[in-house]
Image (tube, rainbow, N blue to C red):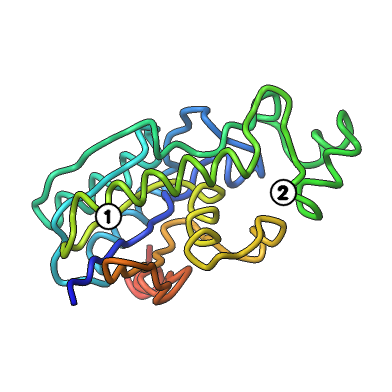
Amino acid sequence: MTMTKIYLVRHGLTEWNIGGRFQGHSDVALAQAGVKQAECLAKHFPAEKIDVVYSSDLQRAAATAGFIAERFDCELKETERLREMNFGEWEGLTFDQISAKWPEAGKQIFLAPDELRPPGGETFEDVERRASKEVERITATHEGECVVLVAHGAFLRTILAYALHMPLRYVWRIKQGNTAVSLLTHDGHHFTVDYMNNIAHLEHLALDGN
């Protein structure tokens, strides 16, 4: 049986993460702490061999992916198809600011995300459709290989929900920390989720005094 491994990686920390701002398609750079996280992840990546790295073309993901591609001396392919959920008019705003201007939507964000439609943005169903199509395409293209896919929190949650056949209403139950690694394997027919939200590499930051 030919097994394909897909390592799902969330980008490193940004200033908007620190400030609790919705990022979406906004092209926000890594914070200095995020750069250190990404460097640490690449150095201690939980795989011995990677064949190719795919990344969202947004700089916070592409920069994170670059460290991994360099570490394994493999090709890095950037694509807008791996971008974060488009949050429309909410981008750059905090949860409190959104709740103040759109009270009903503020309630939906975490309680009923499957019913959520940010003004000018995507629904979680839209994102899952886009994400699942892309991960299926990448898996078919790299059968039997080890692939890294670097993207964003909400986007990666929809891939994991898709693999688990989990309703999107519960998508926020899946934790995805900055530079967290989740692993999917594909046997030619089905995805299996081996693990999620692995941030063990970050322990090395404390050990190194960073």
Q: Amino acid at mark 1?
A: Thr
Question: What element does badge 2 sit on?
Answer: helix
Q: Nearer the viewer, residue 132 or 200?
A: 132
Q: Which residue is painted at 19% across and 42% down in the image?
A: 76
Q: Which mark is residue 139?
A: 1
In this view, which residue lies farthest toward the front?
Answer: 189
Question: Whole-Å distance between the Cαs marked 2 and 1?
Answer: 26 Å
Q: Position of residue 17 (x, y in %)?
A: 58, 45
Q: Quadrant of the N terminus?
A: bottom left
Mark number displayed over residue 114: 2
- Three-letter amino acid code at the position of disc 2: Asp
Q: Nearer the viewer, residue 23 or 210?
A: 23
Where residue 166 sits: x, y (%)?
61, 65
Residue 30 placed where, x, y %?
42, 40
Is 172 left or right of 106, judged from the image as shown?
Answer: left
Q: Between residue 33 and residue 105, name the one nearer to us.
A: 105
Which label is found at residue 170?
none
* 70 in relation to 96, above or below: below
Q: Residues within 10 Å of mark 1 (few under 14, many from 20)?
A: many
In the image, is 183 to the left or to the right of 13?
Answer: left
User: How far across and how far down the image is residue 56, in percent?
Assistant: 37, 38
164 sits to left or right of 22: left
Badge 1 marks a residue whose secondary structure is helix
Q: Earlier in the sequence, mark 2 or mark 1?
A: 2
> Residue at (39%, 35%) from the top-left corner?
81
The residue positioned 22% from the left and 49% from the top of the image is: 53
Determine the residue positioned at 43% across, 62% down: 180
Check the image and report above or below for 125 versus 97: below
| Of 84 and 16, the residue lying toward us | 84
Quadrant that contains the C terminus: bottom left
